[in-house]
Image (spheres, grey):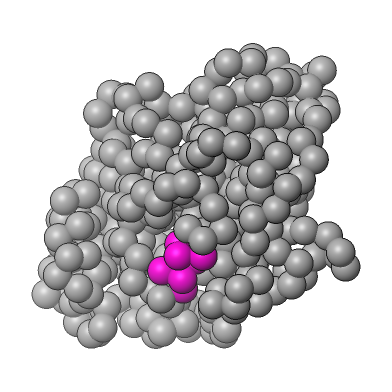
Amino acid sequence: MRAIGYRNSLPIDDPDSLVDVDLPKPEPRGRDLLVEVRAVSVNPVDTKVRKRAQPEPGAWKVLGWDAAGVVAAVGPEASLFKPGDEVFYAGELDRPGTNAEFHLVDERLVGRKPISLDWAQAAALPLTALTAWETLFDRLDVRKPVPGASPSILIVGGAGGVGSIAIQLVRRLTDLMVIATASRPETQEWVRSLGAHHVIDHRHSLAEGIKHIGDAPAFVFSTTNTDQHLAGIVELIAPQGRFALIDDPAAADINPFKRKSVSVHWEFMFTRSMFQTADMEVQHTILNEVSRLVDAGELRTTLAETLKPISAANLKKAHALIESGRAKGKIVLEGFGPA
């Protein structure tokens, strides 16, 4: 089968950073689904793993987690899907990735593809939707008020993939006021179009920006550059508020939160699959609910750009754009083209 991989962790402008390769077609076992991949999206985690994860000597490492496709075969213990079902999912960090014609994934991590979306639109959603959902409802518990705090949430990095979904989920499923950060005119308009009530330019003081809007927010969700904004978040968040982050700051001193009794929550979407947690099938449930909300017109895809076909050349373009920090919404690769 066709796939895209690498043998050495290299800068994206190196010719060998990502290469078109031919690999054996995998076979499903246990609760696996074998999915014929129709579209994949690219996330910051793809670029981070490419830079850090060195394959075994002589082996190819295939990246990619988000995917939409058709179930081609199922393992002997699978019961949630059957061949021919259209699905979408974000996969597992410690298995070969979705940048391949066929891909194995545990069915407990898979949802029904939204009927109203095409392959590219659907592939843009799973990883960011799961990350946003788990952060908002499992970690921050945003449906539980913070006494005395403004019923609002600040989303740092609102125009990114996760932020774009988080804004929509908060607006559709809660009564919280949404304050998002964005710095460029086009990204500010993007987050407003998704439902943000207010927009703050994160190049300036977040604390000052909040003062112009209202009282201290109960919740803060930082999706990017947390180390740059941490001092401001400590200042602006309400006492007994709840703070969540998903990025990898080089240093994050959370001691200043103690005075306000602010709880700090990490979210890592791959925790459930990596540790085979007892509630692993929750991701199947979340994705099915996301699919329902999309088909009901309550959520929209955050697809920003589609590249065709799925190839090393196009994947390099996507990685380069994400590494530039100027991506808006999600970048998707669709179709392998004729064999």
Identify the residue at horizontal 86%, vertical 64% (top origin): 58
View extreme (front): residue:
339
Identify the residue at horizontal 28%, vertical 45% (top origin): 168
Asked if residue 48 lies left or right of residue 116, the reply is right
Q: Position of residue 35 (x, y in %)?
A: 64, 30
View extreme (left): residue:
212
Assess whether residue 177 is covered by the magenta stretch.
no
Q: Give the range drawn in magenta.
A: 316-323
Q: Where is residue 42 in the image (x, y as percent from the top left)?
A: 49, 55
Assess whether residue 322 is covered by the magenta stretch.
yes
Asked if residue 62 lies left or right of residue 247, the reply is right
Is 60 placed above or below 11 here? above
Q: Nearer the viewer, residue 83 or 5?
A: 5
Q: How many labels does the image show?
A: 0
Q: Which of 6 and 202 is in front in this view?
A: 6
Residue 260 visible within the image:
no
Q: Position of residue 260 (x, y in %)?
A: 42, 74
Q: Nearer the viewer, residue 264 or 83?
A: 83
| Secondary structure, magenta segment, majority class | helix
Asked if residue 193 lies left or right of residue 246, the reply is left
Is 87 placed above or below 138 here? above
Identify the residue at horizontal 39%, vertical 62% (top origin): 221
Q: In which quarter of the image is the C terminus?
A: top right
Q: Where is residue 71 in the image (x, y as percent from the top left)?
A: 62, 23
View extreme (right): residue:
57
Residue 307 visible within the image:
yes
Identify the residue at horizontal 65%, vertical 77% (top origin): 10
Q: Which of 177 and 249 is in front in this view?
A: 249
Q: Quadrant of the N terminus?
A: top right
